[in-house]
Image: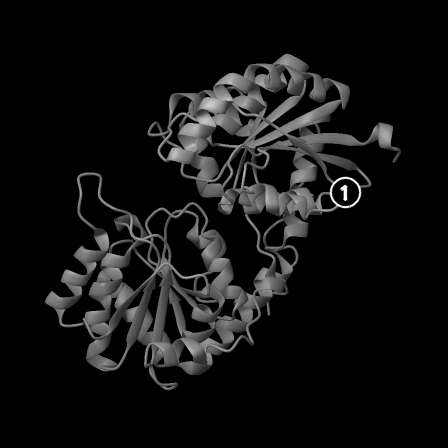
């Protein structure tokens, strides 16, 4: 296919942070077939003594057209840096937006792809309406009326919405988007960055946990819907059979709106249940791979998880997953094969699943092997990019969308 005949795609990346959604989109940018697609990205540029993490990551992607963009101010400005950025954007973005429209037309951009973040989504839709390009708003969360009016407007008015799981797709349909304008494209993980042979001994030594002590890990933001409260309660039951069991709760606390700390609530709960010595709060960590390598089970009983990339990380590290059977979780963690799922909020069932796997090292090994293979054979950036490319073609020519079925590439043995 000649350069003239390629499908030109523009990703809108207005956030300077490199969140989970930005990482997923970076996989698309890297893995879209350059024989068919020409990839462009609009993202913020450098500032004095500061390179946005998103820009730093995008610059590492080969064969990509980078368009530094002065985006409109965000809807909320909290930090001093954000306030300064907002002031600059207020002055610079109108002219830059006109130039961005010209860029889309000059490069014959046919698809404009943004996240559900209000600025990304509205940019994608408005640019599409002004230039005739198709617009995509990619939804990475459970969709509901709680999201901002601009975000809901963008999803409603985009040519198509992409979602990360069938669960998320169902929530978008429930908000009024026609099902035939939604493409379900499960998330992915670059498994080469997750080596199951990583030595976890350093973590056990740091926290004085012996090699034969049962160790659970939970890595996420600390707030009630992630299930840490139920997990601490389950540990009180697990301790009856495994007195030495340890749980590492890893992540940053999300303060309550009206003050206080969820971490402090969890510590108080641990004390009241007599498991303070069993539950270790590490705070945020950069060595999640080593945490995963050190543990016997990955445990996150989160409620209505949209997808759970962290489950893929645990599976890639050959760790069985303990989670709950709702949200997008069952689409990632196959019950009885990659882990065990219990009903949401059911502490007794959660504890029983933990005990069942701690009793059975061979079953843990088998589940870990299966989970790793599942990630390598299905949840890959290459598969996700193929699905994205297929959805783009369907948007442009009205053909049927052909995604790779979840079971299609996996030997069921």
Which quadrant of the figure contains the C terminus?
A: bottom right
Q: Nearer the viewer, residue 136 or 366?
A: 136
| Position of 260 relative to 301 (above/below) | above
Q: Is residue 118 left or right of residue 207?
A: right
Q: Quadrant of residue 275?
A: bottom left
Q: Residue furthest right?
A: 2
> For the view shown, which residue lies furthest in the front direction?
48
How many numbered markers are drawn?
1
Q: Is residue 178 visible?
A: no
Q: Is residue 309 visible?
A: yes
Q: Residue at x 59, y 63 (%)?
A: 193
Badge 1: how crowded within 10 Å, few (<14), some, or many (20+)? few
Classify 246 as above or below 160: below
Query: What colour scheme has been applied to the protein in the rendered image?
Result: one colour
Q: Position of residue 226 (x, y in %)?
A: 32, 52
| Residue at the extreme left of the image, as rendered | 272
Question: Going by the image, does 313 lie left or right of 99?
Answer: left
Quick one: 151 or 86, which is closer to the camera?
Answer: 86
Quadrant in which the N terminus is drawn: top right
**Residue 35: x and y, percent?**
82, 41
Quickly name the residue at label 1.
63
Position above or below: 87 against 188: above
Tell me where residue 393 appears, x and y as whole percent: 71, 32
Identify the residue shown where x is 61% and y is 24%. 135
**Could you tell me which residue is drawn at 54 percent across and 45 percent down?**
53
Depicted 135 relative to depicted 44: above or below: above
Image coords of residue 260 (percent x, y)? 17, 47
In which quadrant of the rendered view does residue 375 lie?
A: bottom right
- From the viewer's side, name the closer residue of 277 and 362: 277
Mark 1 falls on what kind of element?
loop
Residue at the image point whose x is 61% and y is 57% from the top: 190
């Amino acid at each position: 296919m000649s350069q003239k005949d390629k499908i030109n795609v523009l990703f809108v990346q207005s956030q300077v942070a490199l969140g989970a959604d930005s990482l997923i989109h970076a996989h698309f940018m890297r893995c879209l077939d350059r024989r068919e697609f020409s990839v462009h990205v609009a993202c913020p540029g450098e500032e004095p003594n500061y390179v946005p993490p998103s820009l730093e990551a995008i610059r590492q992607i080969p064969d990509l057209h980078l368009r530094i963009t002065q985006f409109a101010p965000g809807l909320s400005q909290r930090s001093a840096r954000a306030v300064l950025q907002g002031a600059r954007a207020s002055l610079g973005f109108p002219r830059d937006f006109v130039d961005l429209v010209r860029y889309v037309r000059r490069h014959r951009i046919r698809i404009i792809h943004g996240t559900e973040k209000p600025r990304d989504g509205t940019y994608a839709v408005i640019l599409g309406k002004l230039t005739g390009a198709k617009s995509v708003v990619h939804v990475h969360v459970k969709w509901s009326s709680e999201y901002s009016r601009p975000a809901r407007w963008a999803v409603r008015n985009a040519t198509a919405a992409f979602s990360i799981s069938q669960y998320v797709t169902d929530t978008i349909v429930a908000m009024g988007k026609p099902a035939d304008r939604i493409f379900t494209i499960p998330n992915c993980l670059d498994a080469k960055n997750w080596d199951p042979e990583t030595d976890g001994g350093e973590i056990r030594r740091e926290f004085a946990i012996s090699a034969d002590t049962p160790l659970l890990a939970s890595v996420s933001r600390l707030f009630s819907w992630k299930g840490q409260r139920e997990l601490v309660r389950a540990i009180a039951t697990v301790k009856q059979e495994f007195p030495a069991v340890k749980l590492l709760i890893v992540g940053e606390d999300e303060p309550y709106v009206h003050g206080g700390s969820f971490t402090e609530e969890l510590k108080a709960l641990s004390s009241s249940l007599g498991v303070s010595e069993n539950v270790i709060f590490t705070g945020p960590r950069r060595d999640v791979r080593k945490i995963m390598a050190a543990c016997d089970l990955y445990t996150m009983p989160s409620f209505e998880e949209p997808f759970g990339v962290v489950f893929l990380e645990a599976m890639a590290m050959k760790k069985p997953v303990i989670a709950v059977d709702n949200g997008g979780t069952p689409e990632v963690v196959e019950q009885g094969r990659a882990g065990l799922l219990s009903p949401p909020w059911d502490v007794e069932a959660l504890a029983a699943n933990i005990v069942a796997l701690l009793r059975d090292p061979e079953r843990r090994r088998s589940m870990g092997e299966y989970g790793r293979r599942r990630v390598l054979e299905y949840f890959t950036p290459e598969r996700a990019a193929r699905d994205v490319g297929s959805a783009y073609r369907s948007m442009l020519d009205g053909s049927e969308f052909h995604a790779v079925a979840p079971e299609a590439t996996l030997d069921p043995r």
